[in-house]
Amino acid sequence: MFSGLTAEGIGMPLRARLVIASYAGLYLLFSAVVLTVAGLMTTNIWISWALAAVLLVLAILLLDAFYPRVSLFIHSISRIPQNPGEKTIALTFDDGPVEPYTGQILDILDRFNVKASFFCIGANIQRYPAVAREIVRRGHTLGNHTQTHRSLLLADADSVARELGEAQKTIRQHCGFEARFFRCPKGYKSPIVARILRRKRLDLVAYGYPIWDVENPPAAELVERVLNRAVPGDIIVMHDGFPPGKSGERDSLVAALPVIIEGLLAKDLRPVSLDQALTARP
Ligand SMILES: [Zn+2]
């Protein structure tokens, strides 16, 4: 049934959809098994109904935790508002700053005179403080992406507060301002993360869809993944760096980015930073 599709034709987004569909299928199967076992063990219908309710609540919590565009416990920004007569899109870069890639990306953005947003890891800012300051100096938005990029999914309130607070402090020390935007590592969140974000007055930023650049596909494929889907208001996530202790390269993205921006501009879609997009205009 897949005979006309090459591996490239199938592409990551479809693979990702299949992964999500299989997780959903597994959960349905798990629920069916639990309810069947409960049905065999007791004739009390209320126990089965109570179990079904628990499974439903758990499914909703899992959806909130893993799916960036669903956020039940705090408002999450997953699109940018559009002004009449102008179509805009937000390019966001996570996991930096890491050289030479962040510097190369900044130069590409300058060449097209467009602004973007960088969700930086505190530990990476400590390693490349001059690059972090350069992001701000060139007019881009710099957001908080935790201090060490540890997953916040199952973290307790103290750990979440420490990850967010230390990154805020790092940004303040090296860049001289209080970050306004936050993005969760891997997009995973929890009701605890929502509570701490509210307390720290940070705005949660999600994204419309990932383009799976971390796997370093050929540049042409990255270009296709963005330009085939991009519509006004999208927040696109890419990666200019790596979490502390990890390494690799971002040459595919650096090669693809100029073509991506040219393609967006040709569609009349102007890349803007989150500060530009979300600051109220008179
Ligand atoms: Zn990340």
Image (cartoon, rainbow, N blue to C red):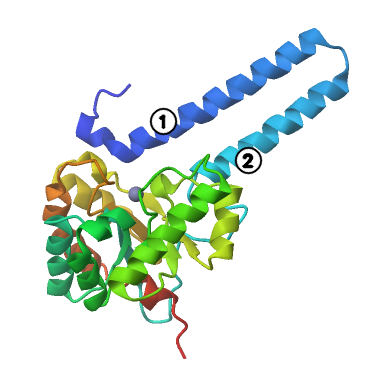
- Tell which of 36 and 182 is nearer to you: 182
Callout 2 secondary element = helix
Which picture quadrant has residue 262?
A: bottom left
Which picture quadrant has residue 174?
A: bottom left
Residue 71: assigned label: none
Q: Mark 1, mark 2: which one is toward the viewer?
A: 2
- Tell which of 119 and 229 is nearer to you: 119
Where residue 95 sits: x, y (%)?
Answer: 29, 52
Mark 2 residue's CB less than 8 Å from ligand 1: no
Q: Mark 2, residues whose alpha carbon is within 10 Å: few (<14), some, or many (≥20)? A: few
Looking at the image, is 116 positioned above or below residue 223? below
- Tell which of 250 and 159 is nearer to you: 159
Residue 206 seen in the current view: no
Where residue 60 sits: x, y (%)?
Answer: 63, 40
Residue 19: assigned label: 1
Left or right relative to 35: residue 273:
left
Residue 60: assigned label: 2
Residue under the image location 24 percent in, 46 percent down: 213
Q: Amino acid at mark 1?
A: Val
Looking at the image, is 182 positioned above or below residue 49? below
Where residue 219 sits: x, y (%)?
Answer: 14, 48
Distance of label 1 from label 2 (alpha carbons): 18 Å
